[in-house]
Amino acid sequence: MSLPDTLTISPSVLYFGTPVALVGTADSHANANISPVSSLWALGETIVLGLGTTGCALENIHKTEECTINLPSADLWPKIEAIARTTGSSPVPPKKAAIGYIHHPDKFALGGFTPVSSETVPAPRIAECPLQLECRLSALHGDKVRGFVLVDLEVTRVHAHRDIVVEGTRHIDTSRGHPLFFVFREYFGDARPLGRNFRVGR
Ligand SMILES: Cc1cc2nc3c(=O)[nH]c(=O)nc-3n(C[C@H](O)[C@H](O)[C@H](O)COP(=O)(O)O)c2cc1C
């Protein structure tokens, strides 16, 4: 069998496909904000986010040293897109204004999201998201030259909608969760299970 032919290309984005998360933050006056992200990964109790240096999320996390990470289901994508062009920062940073971003002071109202109080941090969770993680800042890595930093978070509490938890266990029922992915700036859902890793249940 011949191997697939390849082209050398320079894509305008390299978002090859990662889950969407909504970062919940609060400023020092308890004004709540939501920031959609897709540059994130989890290992053990650690979550690492890639956040733009001009965003309101980073400004709030820098000040309060905490946030929530809310994992939406695929059907929530229109609500996320409804807040996508906005920032909690005012004035809007010039580079974002140039590509059409506007300031909005209440993205919960704009997107039709419901804030819920967290138990270990002041930042609110998002009721509509099936998985809601409360997090404290462990470290910030990187510099402003690249325009983003890596936000290293420790998960302090995990909340899950009852209907995605296997009854009587602490496990997520993957047949009932429908994660949302961001792939080259398009929303994807309906991930279907293909097979189980040998560590499931161990
Ligand atoms: C699906 C999606 C994924 C995004 N991923 C990221 C990301 O990983 N990191 C980032 O800094 N911005 C990301 N953005 C852009 C931010 O959401 C955008 O800069 C927004 O204005 C941030 O809001 P804030 O300034 O109120 O924090 C993403 C946007 C969308 C819609």
Image (cartoon, grey):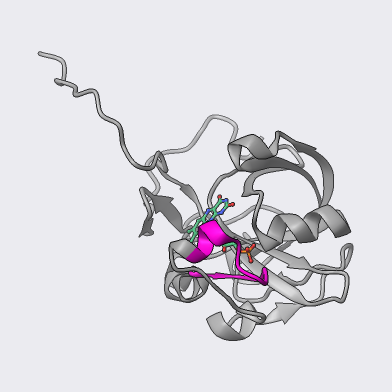
- Compared across the picture, whether 63 is left or right of 37 comes to right
Q: Magenta span has 40?
A: no
Q: Residue at x 19, y 22 (%)?
A: 6
Against 161, is 136 above or below?
A: above
Question: What x and y, as percent, mark residue 89?
Answer: 67, 68
Q: Residue farthest to the left?
A: 1
Q: Residue at x 87, y 63 (%)?
A: 121
The residue nearer to you, when weighing 138 against 197, is 138
Q: Magenta span has 95?
A: yes
Residue 196 visible in the shown view? yes
The residue nearer to you, when weighing 111 against 71, is 111
The quadrant where residue 189 appears: bottom left
Question: What x and y, as percent, mark residue 175?
Answer: 47, 57
The quadrant where residue 152 appears: top right
Q: Residue at x 78, y 61 (%)?
A: 60
The residue nearer to you, when weighing 75 against 199, is 75
View quadrant of ligand 1: bottom right
- Compared across the picture, whether 194 is left or right of 49 comes to left
Question: Over which residues does the magenta segment extend?
Answer: 84-97
The C terminus, quarter of image: top right
Question: What x and y, as percent, mark residue 95?
Answer: 52, 57
Against 149, is 190 above or below?
A: below
Against 85, is 108 above or below?
A: below
Q: Residue at x 14, y 20 (%)?
A: 5
- Compared across the picture, whether 184 is left or right of 62 comes to left
